[in-house]
Amino acid sequence: MNDAAYKMKLGDLAHIRAGHPFRGAVESVAKGAVAVAQMKDILPGGGVDWSSAVRTELVGRKEPDWLIGGDLLFVSRGSRYFAVCVDSPPALAVCGPHLFHLTVKARDLLMPEFLAWVVGQSPVQRQLQQAASGSLQLSVTRQALEALEIPLPPLATQRVVADLATAAARERAVLTALIRNREQQLEALASALASGQSINLT
């Protein structure tokens, strides 16, 4: 089997849409039917924290671009550009205007999880950094996203890479929690020493 990866333009692999065109800030509506994923809801390790998403109601006649499982959200502003997979979104969910909404055209050709991973790697990051523009804040346009060259290995290879990336994210979360716990322990010891308390390190 040939495991070599050829390259395709992202615009040929995925539908790329701007987030929902809210006019101004997203208005929070108690018991609103629609969840809105915004940059603040993007989890550092990937995915969306739907529990923190604003609920609202949408107006207008145009059918929104609803988010479904396996879609991706692309963060196009700031110093780091990355994509996360949407997992188990609410029945009615959209993303805010500062995110791009990507839907893979053919999942028998490209895994969304692999695409999210490869966007964060240095070869694609270099393309994004070169394409970013703006005077006050750098951002990546939809046209620049569509022009990105994405390596496309066989689906079996994509699956292995995606699984490795998931395992690495889990390991990173565990190590981060261990470091945080140790730092809290040391801070407690420092406070005890400062207040003249005796400490037992055995």
Image (spheres, grey):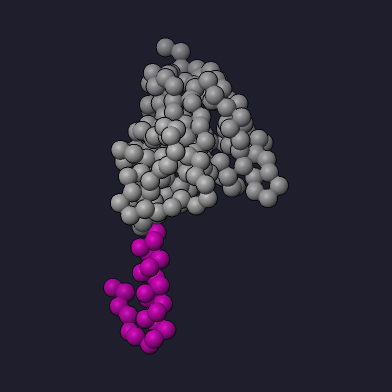
Extreme-front residue of the structure: 61
Residue numbers of the magenta segment: 179-202
The residue drawn where x is 44% and y is 21% is: 105
The residue drawn where x is 49% and y is 44% is: 22
Residue 125 location (% of width, % of height): 58, 36
- In the rendered structure, does residue 84 fall within the stretch colored magenta? no
Residue 191 location (% of width, % of height): 40, 79
**Could one spot residue 108 in this view of the protein?**
yes
**SS assignment for the magenta stretch, majority:** helix
Residue 36 in the image: above or below residue 200: above
**52 on left or right of 5:** left
**196 on left or right of 141:** left
Residue 133 location (% of width, % of height): 68, 40
Quadrant of the snapshot with the C terminus = bottom left
- Front residue (pair 130, 197): 130
The residue drawn where x is 65% and y is 39% is: 132
**202 on left or right of 81:** left
- Front residue (pair 57, 183): 57
- In the rendered structure, does residue 198 fall within the stretch colored magenta? yes
